[in-house]
Amino acid sequence: MALDTVAIASTTPDQVQPFAELGLKSDEYQRIHEILGRRPSSSELAMYSVMWSEHCSYKSSKVHLRQFGEKAPKSDALLVGIGENAGVVDVGQGYAVTFKIESHNHPSFIEPNQGAATGIGGIVRDILTMGARPIAVMDPLRFGPADAPDTRRVLPGVIAGIGGYGNCLGLPNIGGEIVFDQTYAGNPLVNALCVGVMRHEQIKLAKASGPGNLVVLFGAKTGGDGIGGVSVLASETFGSSGPAKRPSVQVGDPFTEKVLIECSLEIFAEDLVIGIQDLGGAGLSCATSELASGGSGGMEVELDKVPLRDPSLSPEEILMSESQERMCAIVEPSKIARFLEICEKWDVTVTVIGKVTNGERLIITWHGEVIVDVPPRTVAHDGPVYNRPMTKPAYLDQLNAKTLDLPMPKNSSEIKAAILKLMSSANMADKSWVTSQYDKYVQGNTIQSQPQDSGMVRIDENSNLGVAISTDANASWSYLNPYEGAKLALAEAARNIATAGAKPLAVTNCLNFGSPEDPEVMWQFAETVRGLADGCLEMGLPVTGGNVSFYNQTGDVAILPTPIIGVLGVIQDVRTRTPMAFDRPGLELYLLGETRADLAGSQWAYLHGERGGQAPLANLKNEMSLIDLLLESQSIFEAAHDLSQGGLIATLTEMVLEHSVGASINLDGDLAIALLSETPGRVVVAVRKEDARVLSDTAFKHNIAVTRIGETGGESLSINDVVLDLTELRTTFTQTFPKLFG
Amino acid sequence: MKVGVVTFPGSLDDQDAARAVRFAGAKPVSLWHRDSDLHGVDAVILPGGFSYGDYLRCGAISRFAPVMTSIIEQAKSGLPVLGICNGFQILCESHLLPGALTRNQGLHFLCGPQKIRIENTTSAWTSNFVQGQEIVIPLKNGEGSFQCDDSTLAQLEGEGRVIARYLGENPNGSRNFIAGITNAKGNVVGIMPHPEHAIDSLTGPTTDGLAFFTSVLTTLVGK
């Protein structure tokens, strides 16, 4: 395999290069020529192609994502905003918290276990890279129909991957979601969220400054995994002396990552790095170009120094390899001895691969020959930007105009049957078959985890300061109205935080969509971003970062637009948090918020194959009042539980089953609507009789409707004349997952 | 009173074990796997986790760590040692305890509150319990099914060395529902569920686990 150097590239301008196979358009390839003033060497081509990919460059989404900055609300909480590995938020007492969601959708379809595992691994390194100790993970998931044969391949693998990797890292898994829908059949969504905590002064950034400082690669050795596309370079252009095709799914080793985390934290604690970047998507191409452009620009790297698992790798492959569990640090020469010592303590492989220079170019050599000589910014940040065409989907007006014709239960036996049918459906049923495979106890700081409304972890054992996180999306609403859908998901996540007694503070997101080259998908995306940015501005919550995953489609069928919104909140004393369920009889139950006939996009509609109608409109002013009410009255709540998918009946079912304490409920009006409607902005709370007056006064003050719906106690959930024995309800609710996947 | 908590590469519950020692009123001392010096501790805890990645077999590499050479030696002369989960696996691999922990019957990692019954209150780590006491502490493991041959089982049962048994459905297929055992002297105890995660009702299902850590202090004082 002949080495293609910069010198050769300068003298062979007409050499044909496989840019199209690497995913570059001809005008993009042309732009590389203009930047370099010559054709790129094959290593440069590899770097540009992967860094200018949709995944790394956000070329289709950038023009829209700008709104998160333009419409950003004023916030004192934001310490590090969009653009770094993850945003950082001030939570008080000198603590900073960083959190982010990323997708690992496509790899998880091909190889569910490793795809999901490395999704966890990647997001954990993003958090670590900011200087933080990772303290918890969550995972919003979407799959095809629960009873489809392929879901039985994908789901157990994904769960085992998340559990296998996360459990082995010692990170409690504190929440997430699982939703099934036909459109995810060929495109499951595996999103992973990680949250980490550090002191303010420990925040680290990806920058390579200070000429003479060393570029240090540490962690796992580089192998041939995750190179995917670049194998074109190796096999088609340069002959075939090495292994021809490489696996495109990365393989993770959580033990290596656990050791890397502890090693890195010890290095950070001694303040031994100037800048740091993890190696994730695009591997060394990304780490070196981002570090260099984060500093003054100059960097020299001797690529042949990179320790390899597979000695046959070509330089192009080394640059592209997405081998897991690697980090790249910028270290002052005076501190390198101690740095190496700590790596030795943890048995972590470490190599000095280059240095920061006072030039402006990233120069990479291979056994002394220059194979890359580029302005790093052009690789990392100056990728193409597309203003892709958008069209409002043809389906929408017709769908929105549709009058829903759903079979609604009328008498008590029909209502009982409807409840059992709904609560045994895969989307609504108990998920403990899944969550029991995750460690929620490790680190000893988990205050709340699934099935609570939000995950909550304590970050200071003395002051009891804590953070709560919730991730939410209602893709059925986004499908009917992506602008409102994004706002509604934001509102739901914020409400879930406040329901537990934490104050919403900041937002992250993972926007999962079909192909951006389809103008209708692009419109869904643009409307979603506009809705989220407007919603965040109105609610005063800054977006700290996020991730876009496009091309989630099978043939012409895109997934439902699925913007997963994560909201982080802070709680001053975790001991005061409100649990989702009551554990004793004699409490009064109140419904906060108004119920309308909102069945479009509901689970009841989904069960009947009905996608049409109008999504509810988000009333964020009302949502903020509800949040204020929840926070102000927190001390009188014995329990509080949000209403979302499945409506009031889902909320009540989950509340009575948690501690096996029943409830007697009396509802006025149309009982089916009262139980099945999914009107947003509602919460059920349990209070002592003597506190009822305070609750109604406070609700009145915040202009939130409050309705007494019943009281706790008994062996059943009885609603008017419908009686559901708790044992029967529990069996219905819990048997679905073991039956499908056990 | 000083209780050592060993950190192997891949240990996960070492901080939790140290916290439990503090809650019990003793001083936790961090012990590093490469250091054979036990720093004069009065007892040792091998915490849960995936030491050395659990490569080869759970606990199979850890038993050769320098710190284990000292622990094995001193355990034989009476040093109280508690192995939790991965620590239990290490004790079996070290032959301080008989038997082996194998893959859960259901083949899944399982995490949740688990009811167990304390069967032996004479060991160094269970003396503060009441015989037959039923407690709830978290169970979380993928390889927690206790297995041994018939004669070992008969010996363990005959000598009253089963210290705790699972109640309700057998969660992992352990022989005779065994959740924990002790050696003949009663100073070395291995337990699969996690008492260190049940010392504070804010973060655990109960505070039932704390008695494991206060027991060893009672034992040491009584010596």
Image: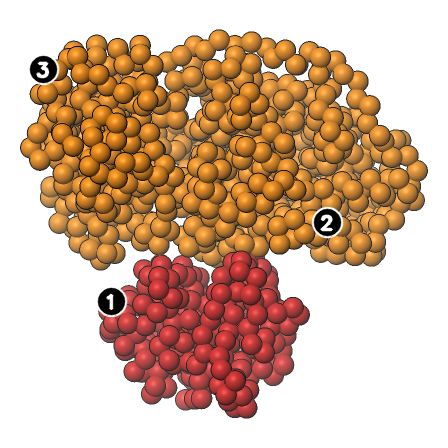
Chain colours: A orange, B red
> Would residue A356 be found to the left or right of residue A544 on screen?
left
Does mark 3 fall on the same chain as mark 1?
no
Query: What residue would you read off at disc 3?
Result: A11
Q: Residue at x 27, y 78 (%)?
A: B70
Above or below, A728 relative to B44: above
Graded by Cα atoms within 10 Å as few (under 14), some (14 to 19) or many (20 or more), the crowding at tag 2 reads many
Three-letter code for the amino acid on which mark 1 is drawn: Arg
Q: Position of residue A543 (x, y in %)?
A: 47, 26
Quadrant placement of the C terminus of chain A: bottom right
Spatial distance from mark 1 to mark 3, Cα to Cα?
56 Å
Query: What residue would you read off at disc 2?
Result: A733
Three-letter code for the amino acid on which mark 2 is drawn: Phe
> Would residue B186 be found to the left or right of residue A291 on screen?
right
Query: What residue would you read off at disc 1?
Result: B34
> Would residue A326 be found to the left or right of residue A484 on screen?
left
Chain containing mark 1: B
Q: Residue at x 55, y 20 (%)?
A: A556
Q: Position of residue A463 (x, y in %)?
A: 47, 51
Q: Please give the count of numbered marks on the rendered protein.
A: 3
* Image marks 2 and 1: residues in contact by CB distance under 8 Å: no
Graded by Cα atoms within 10 Å as few (under 14), some (14 to 19) or many (20 or more), the crowding at tag 3 reads few
The secondary element bearing badge 1 is classed as: loop
Residue A304 in view in this figure: yes
Three-letter code for the amino acid on which mark 3 is drawn: Thr
> Would residue A51 be found to the left or right of residue B119 on screen?
left
Above or below, A697 relative to A23: below
Spatial distance from mark 2 to mark 3, Cα to Cα?
70 Å
Residue A197 in view in this figure: no
- The image quarter containing residue A692 is top right
